[in-house]
Structure formats: C-alpha cells, structure tokens
Image (spheres, rainbow, N blue to C red):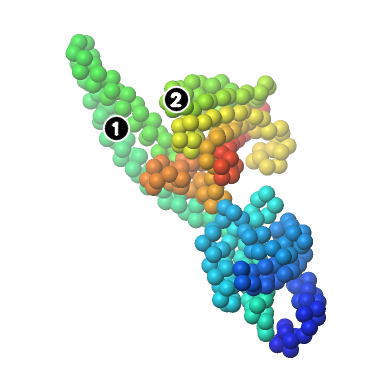
C-alpha cells in the first residue's frame, strides 16, 4: 500500500484493503486506532477459521474479541500500548478460540501512509510451544530424576541404620511398662515406616525401580486405598466413589496406584482449602480406541474430580512439571511424581480444568485381557 493509495477515497481504500487482506494466506486483520483503543476493521477467512468466529463477530470490536481472559494480560497491555504510540508490535499471546484457546504469534505494522490503520497477522504456534515445553519438561525430569535417585539412596542408607536400632530397642525395651518408652517405640516405628514409604516414592519417581506390574482388580485396589487414605482427609471434605460393573483387570502396581491416588487427593484438598467434594470414578475404555498404546486390549482408568479453584491455562500447561504448584513455593512436587509413577506402569495421566470450575485428573492403565 503506497501513500498514493492512502489518499484515495475511503470507499476505494476499504475495497483495496479488503482485497489485499483476502489474498493473504495467513490469518490476518486490519485494526483502526481510535481514542479508546484499537477496533477490528476487517478479518480474512484464515483468521475466522483460526479463531472459530465469523467476520461479523469480529469487525467493529476491540482487541478483547481475540483475547483469552485467562491469558497473559501484561502481554496484551504491552501490545495495546505499542498500538497507541503507532509503533509496530509483536507478541506471543494466548488467544480465544470458541470455548478454548490457542497460542498465537501476532505481528502488527502501520499501514503505509495511514498511521491510524494497522495490518496484523497471527500465526498459530501452539504445536511449537507444546514441543518446546515438552523438551524443557523432559530435561527437567531427567535432571530431577538423577538428583532424586542420589538423595533417595543416601537417605535410605541412613534409614536402614535407624530401623536397625529401633528394632534393637523394641527387643530390649518392648516389655518395659513405662509409658514414655512405649510411646517412643511406637512413634519411632511409625516414623520409620513413613520414611520407608517416602523412599519408595522417591526411587519410583527417579525411575530406578521397575514396578511389579500385574493384573489388578482396580475396583478392589481403589476401595482399599481410599479406606487407608480417607482418615487423613480434612473433616470438611466429602469423598464419593463410583464403580461400574464389569470392569476388566488393569495392568498396574497396587502400591504405586495408592501412592498416585494419595498425591492426587492431597492436591485436591489443597485446591479446596479443606472444604468441598472429591468424586472418584472408575471407567473402562473399549478395545480399538486408537488413543491407547495397546488399542487391541482396551484400558481401565479412574478419574478424580474436585470442586476447587481450578487451574489457569498457563498453570494447566505445566501442571506435570517438577515442583509446579499453585501454592507458595517449596510445597510439594506437584503431579510430577504421579506422572513418573504412571509412566513406569505404561499408564497415562491427563488433567482437565478451568478457573473456578475445579479439576479432573485421569489415570489410565492398560487392560489385562
């Protein structure tokens, strides 16, 4: 577009801009700067397909028509400031698409000869970001696994010494009637057992222990695990369990299944601040589902849903990263440990969540047929 074109009548400029926009292969739009911000003047078919919106739904509206409300508001603010100054701008932002969202790279430049109008193009970079995030996550997990394995082995060496002395004290002082001695023996035994469980968790997460995977009655294993975990839940938490008939056995390790379930329940309780409902549901996936690693056998799984505050899209995208947390720094290892436990059992974990609508975590195991 030349300065001469900019001096053409408005009708001719609109026709020229519209034809130019329609010819662009990438999703593109025209923005008009106003005193209150930037308004979408036109959008091509590529942008409508990318955002899942009709041109009539976009034209005449501000940038908020493209903005995902759970996105990076600071990034959108910087984009608006650049537009207000009449300067070119580029940003990688979270855009809305129907009921969902996508990551896009937007580039805006002033129209030659008309600083009040901007031409913009948006490139969907969701797959690139997912690949980059997956690579970074893999490196984090590899480093964390090596560190965890080293710490767990050193911890286990000290633990074995403590357990040996506790067993010796029980043999020598177990028949002493003094309350303090009996209480000290009981508490020391309980603490050593909890430490042993923690060591198993750490070693399992570091992927140095191959679990004993075998056909397991998932309904019975989940019932038994919840019976042990339920007393540790806050009093204000209601826990429900739904089990359909005819579930096939699952290929998994019942101990690691309970460890994973314990982590998920703990996260759910934190998200609900000790007040709310957790619903555990078992389900079967019929053979032939191409999303499974072994589609010929089918799968068995469980979902854990809570009524907590939910997760933002940014937090959801890194929920399985080591030490990712919505709480203050330094509390817990997030769901990374659960991911490690599931991977070692040839299972999968997935999370669905929206802000204010709680979260659902699904664990899926191969079926034993």
Question: Does residue 270 appear left or right of residue 13 in this picture?
Answer: left
Position above or below: 329 against 78: above
Cα distance, mark 1 to mark 2? 33 Å
Question: Does residue 65 appear left or right of residue 74 in this picture?
Answer: right
Q: Is residue 26 visible?
A: no
**Residue underneath mark 2:** 235
Q: How far from the left and from the top, in percent, is residue 222?
A: 54, 25
Task: Say which of marks 1 and 2 sits in front.
Answer: 2
Picture disc at residue 159 = 1
Position above or below: 119 against 168: below
Please identify the quarter of the rendering in which residue 149 is found: top left
Q: Is residue 296 visible?
A: yes
Find numbered disc 1 in the image and state the secondary structure of the residue it sits on: helix
Residue in the foreground of this view, choosing between 226 and 111: 111
- Location of the C terminus (image quadrant): top right
Residue drawn at x 59%, y 44% is 354
Please identify the quarter of the rendering in which residue 205 is found: top left
Q: How far from the left and from the top, in percent, is residue 273?
A: 45, 35
Question: Does residue 11 appear left or right of residue 228 in this picture?
Answer: right
Q: How far from the left and from the top, in percent, is residue 125?
A: 62, 61
Residue in the foreground of this view, choosing between 193 and 321: 321
Find numbered disc 2 in the image and state the secondary structure of the residue it sits on: loop
- Location of the N terminus (image quadrant): bottom right
């Amino acid at each position: 577009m030349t300065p001469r074109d900019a001096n053409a009548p408005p009708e001719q400029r609109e026709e020229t801009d519209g034809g130019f926009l329609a010819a662009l292969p990438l999703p593109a739009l025209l923005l008009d700067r106003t005193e209150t911000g930037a308004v979408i003047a036109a959008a091509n078919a590529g942008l409508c397909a990318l955002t899942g919106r009709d041109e009539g739904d976009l034209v005449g509206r501000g940038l908020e028509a493209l903005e995902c409300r759970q996105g990076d508001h600071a990034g959108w603010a910087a984009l608006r400031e650049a537009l207000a100054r009449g300067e070119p701008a580029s940003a990688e932002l979270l855009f809305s698409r129907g009921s969902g969202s996508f990551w896009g790279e937007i580039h805006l430049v002033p129209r030659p000869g008309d600083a009040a109008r901007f031409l913009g193009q948006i490139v969907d970079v969701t797959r690139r970001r997912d690949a980059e995030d997956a690579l970074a996550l893999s490196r984090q997990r590899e480093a964390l696994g090596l560190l965890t394995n080293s710490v767990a082995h050193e911890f286990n060496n000290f633990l074995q010494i403590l357990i040996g002395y506790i067993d010796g004290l029980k043999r020598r002082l177990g028949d002493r009637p003094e309350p303090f001695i009996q209480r000290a023996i009981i508490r020391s035994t309980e603490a050593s057992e909890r430490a042993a469980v923690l060591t198993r968790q750490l070693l399992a997460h570091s992927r140095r222990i191959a679990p004993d995977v075998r056909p397991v009655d998932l309904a019975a294993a989940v019932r038994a695990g919840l019976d042990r975990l339920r007393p540790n839940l806050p009093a204000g938490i209601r826990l429900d369990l739904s089990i359909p008939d005819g579930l096939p056995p699952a290929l998994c390790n019942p101990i690691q299944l309970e460890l994973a379930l314990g982590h998920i329940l703990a996260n759910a309780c934190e998200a609900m601040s000790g007040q709310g409902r957790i619903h555990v549901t078992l389900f079967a996936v019929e053979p032939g589902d191409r999303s499974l690693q072994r589609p010929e056998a089918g799968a068995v799984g469980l979902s854990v849903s809570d009524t907590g505050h939910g997760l933002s899209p940014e937090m959801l995208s890194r929920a399985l990263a080591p030490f990712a947390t919505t709480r203050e720094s330094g509390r817990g290892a997030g769901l990374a440990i659960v991911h490690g436990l599931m991977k070692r059992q040839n299972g999968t974990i997935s999370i669905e969540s929206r802000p204010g609508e709680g979260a659902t975590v699904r664990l899926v195991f191969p079926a034993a047929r």
